[in-house]
């Protein structure tokens, strides 16, 4: 991490990790991960060139349907027993315009690591009622699940594809400045 950087720690109580994937190519199934953690180290007064480390607990996946969640945790998908974490480590955090950034880094799902670029909107910063200084971000992007070894497919009797390949990510993060 950076020598002269400000450290920010993710506040999971005020953050969320959500994903959407097409089901039968006609609608989306939405899910969340309930447990995750992250650290951001950034140069003073700017998040440009920040370094971000993030991980989430695969076993905390929740699509509001226990049977589906169990299938997603199984070896056919995430194999949570063997690969309990999904991790992201940034390689660049670059301002593109105003409060918008590109966050590029290495995403690891199961035993596959690939570079991805996500869009980040800096929502601003504020001091909370306890005196903690916070910064908020919305992270969006899309990844192809098959590129990360999530290759399970199903076809209905009528020939319809059960599950899409693209996974849309919508992540809201709130970090607390460490003093």
Image: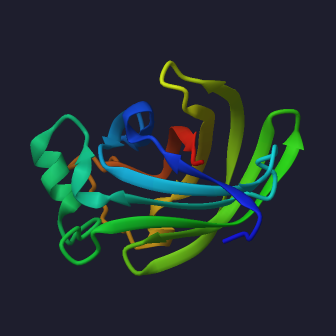
Quadrant where the image shows the N terminus: bottom right
Residue reaching furthest to the bottom: 111
| Residue 20, x across and y down, in percent | 43, 40
State the residue in front, 137 or 72.
137
Q: Quadrant of residue 96?
A: top right
| Residue drawn at the location 71% of the way across and 35% of the way down | 122
Q: Is residue 53 left or right of residue 152?
A: right
| Residue drawn at the location 80% of the way across and 34% of the way down | 99
| Residue drawn at the location 27% of the way across and 69% of the way down | 84
Look at the image and name its color scheme: rainbow
Can residue 87 be seen at all in this image of the molecule? Answer: yes
Q: Is residue 73 left or right of residue 127?
A: left
| Residue 121, x across and y down, in percent | 71, 35
State the residue in front, 92 or 132.
132
Q: Quadrant of residue 2?
A: bottom right
Can residue 27 be seen at all in this image of the molecule? Answer: no
Q: Is residue 103 above or below residue 101?
A: below
| Residue 127, x across and y down, in percent | 61, 25
Total numbered badges shown on the rendered structure:
0
């Amino acid at each position: 991490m950076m020598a002269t950087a400000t450290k920010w720690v993710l506040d999971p109580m005020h953050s969320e990790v959500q994903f959407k994937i097409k089901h039968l190519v006609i609608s989306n199934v939405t899910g969340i991960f309930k447990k995750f953690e992250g650290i951001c180290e950034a140069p003073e007064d700017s998040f440009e060139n920040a370094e971000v480390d993030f991980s989430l607990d695969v076993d905390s996946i929740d699509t509001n349907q226990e049977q589906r969640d169990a299938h997603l945790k199984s070896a056919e998908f995430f194999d949570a027993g063997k690969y309990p974490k999904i991790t992201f480590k940034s390689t660049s955090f670059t301002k593109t315009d105003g409060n918008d950034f590109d966050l590029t880094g290495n995403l690891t799902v199961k035993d596959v690591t690939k570079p991805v670029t996500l869009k980040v909107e800096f929502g601003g910063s504020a001091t909370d009622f306890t005196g903690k200084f916070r910064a908020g971000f919305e992270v969006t992007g899309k990844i192809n699940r098959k590129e990360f070894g999530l290759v399970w497919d199903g076809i209905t009797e009528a020939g319809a594809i059960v599950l899409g390949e693209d996974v849309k990510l919508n992540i809201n993060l709130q970090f607390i400045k460490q003093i």
